[in-house]
Each structure stands twice: as structure tokens, then as C-alpha cells.
């Protein structure tokens, strides 16, 4: 009698376990959904913006003038408010370069056949093949001489907007713990003091 009761209890437990395992496989936790959204955002940005070379060599174009009295001096730290790259906003950045120039948001089609990139921020005046003085007018068609992203160097681009500002080259950490070094560019308005 005890064996039959034990077997019935064991059977009920196994049935409950198998029913739980066969439940709706679409149920996800909020954490899972947050991870999915992040992965979708990363994939979407890669589709729209191609492969961005987050780190750079630290070399700057000829003729680019160092800022004489930048708001954020070299070796100081600031918080990034820029959102034109995932994992950038809110990161603490170390300033490794500060330059006076005109920064442009541009739309271009990569030379490697990738999808058009709209409103890419930023390309500076010294990274454009032109003898015209800055700032160039919105709508001007130019040839890029920057290599921040695959297919950018040599691409034909249209100026969407311009900003005469101090641009900064920065080092910062991504959420996965990897370091981005000599990233080009963030503008003064995309930084805020560290509290």
C-alpha cells in the first residue's frame, strides 16, 4: 500500500515537471527581454552604420590645430553624453586630444558596397577632400578622407549639418570591459563634467 502511494506521488511529481517543461517557451524574463533588445539594437546599428573602428591610431589629419584652452584638458576625465554609438552614452572618458575645427554630420554610401549611412557623427573639416574654407554649407557634396568606419575613406558624402567646436579624441570602456582608445570624435557638447 505504501509502495502504491509512493508511486502515485512520484508519478504526480513527474507529470508536474513535464508539464512545466512543456509550458509556453515564449515566456521570457524581463532580463532576457532586455538582453534581446540590446542584441537587436547592436545588430540594427551594425546594419545602419557598418563596422565602426572604435579605436584609432591616435594620428590626426595634417593642419588640425590643437585647442589652446579646451574645456576638458588632455588627461582629464569627463562623462560622454553622445549617443551616436551604442555603449557610449554615460561612459567615463579620458581626454587624449582636443582640437579646434568644424565637425560635420554626413550621409554617405560606403565604398565597399554597404548600405548608405545617414547622419554619421562626426567627420571633421580636415578629413574632407576640399580646398574650401570651413564651414561647408549643408547639402554640399564632398569626398571623405576619414577611416573611422569600413568603406568611409574615399566615399562621396553629403553634409547634413556642421558645428564649429572643440572636438575630442577619447579613451573609454565598453560595457563588456573592452577599452576603446583614441576614438574620433566627440564634440564639446557631447561631454559633461564628471561629478
Image: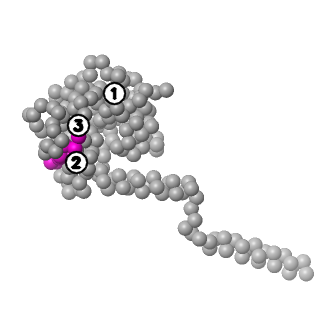
Tell me: 32 left or right of 141.
right
Residues tagged 2 and 1 counted as in contact (Cβ below 8 A): no
Q: Which residue is mark 1?
A: 96
Q: Is residue 23 visible?
A: yes
The crowding category of the residue bearing disc 1, from other C-alpha atoms within 10 Å (few below 14, some 14 to 19, many at least 20), is: some
Closest to the camera, between mark 1 and mark 3, is 3
Q: Which residue is mark 2?
A: 107
The residue positioned 31% from the left and 32% from the top of the image is: 187
Q: Is residue 18 above or below residue 174?
A: below
Q: Work out whether mark 3 precedes mark 2 in sequence or the reverse, and give the earlier one.
A: 2
Q: Residue furthest left?
A: 131
Q: Which residue is mark 3?
A: 162
Q: Position of residue 175 (x, y in %)?
A: 46, 43
The residue positioned 39% from the left and 46% from the top of the image is: 86
Q: Is residue 70 above or below residue 5?
A: above
Closest to the camera, between mark 2 and mark 1, is 2
- Magenta residues span 151-162
Residues tagged 3 and 2 counted as in contact (Cβ below 8 A): no
Task: Determine if the magenta segment contains residue 157.
Answer: yes
Q: Which image quarter is the N terminus in? A: bottom right
Q: Position of residue 136 (x, y in %)?
A: 15, 36
Amino acid at each position: 500500500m505504501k509502495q502504491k502511494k509512493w508511486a502515485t506521488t512520484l508519478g504526480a511529481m513527474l507529470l508536474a515537471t513535464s508539464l512545466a517543461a512543456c509550458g509556453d517557451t515564449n515566456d521570457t524574463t524581463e532580463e532576457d527581454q532586455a538582453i534581446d533588445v540590446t542584441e537587436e539594437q547592436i545588430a540594427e546599428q551594425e546594419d545602419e552604420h557598418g563596422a565602426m573602428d572604435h579605436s584609432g591610431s591616435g594620428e590626426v589629419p595634417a593642419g588640425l590645430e590643437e585647442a589652446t584652452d579646451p574645456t576638458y584638458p588632455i588627461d582629464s576625465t569627463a562623462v560622454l553624453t553622445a549617443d551616436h554609438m551604442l555603449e557610449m552614452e554615460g561612459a567615463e572618458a579620458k581626454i587624449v586630444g582636443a582640437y579646434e575645427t568644424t565637425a560635420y554630420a554626413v550621409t554617405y554610401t560606403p565604398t565597399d558596397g554597404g548600405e548608405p549611412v545617414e547622419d554619421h557623427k562626426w567627420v571633421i573639416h580636415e578629413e574632407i577632400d576640399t580646398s574650401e574654407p570651413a564651414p561647408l554649407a549643408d547639402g554640399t557634396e564632398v569626398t571623405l578622407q576619414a577611416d573611422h568606419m569600413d568603406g568611409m575613406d574615399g566615399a562621396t558624402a553629403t553634409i547634413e549639418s556642421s558645428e564649429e567646436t572643440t572636438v575630442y579624441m577619447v579613451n573609454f570602456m565598453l560595457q563588456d570591459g573592452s577599452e576603446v582608445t583614441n576614438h574620433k570624435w566627440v564634440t564639446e557638447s557631447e561631454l559633461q563634467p564628471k561629478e
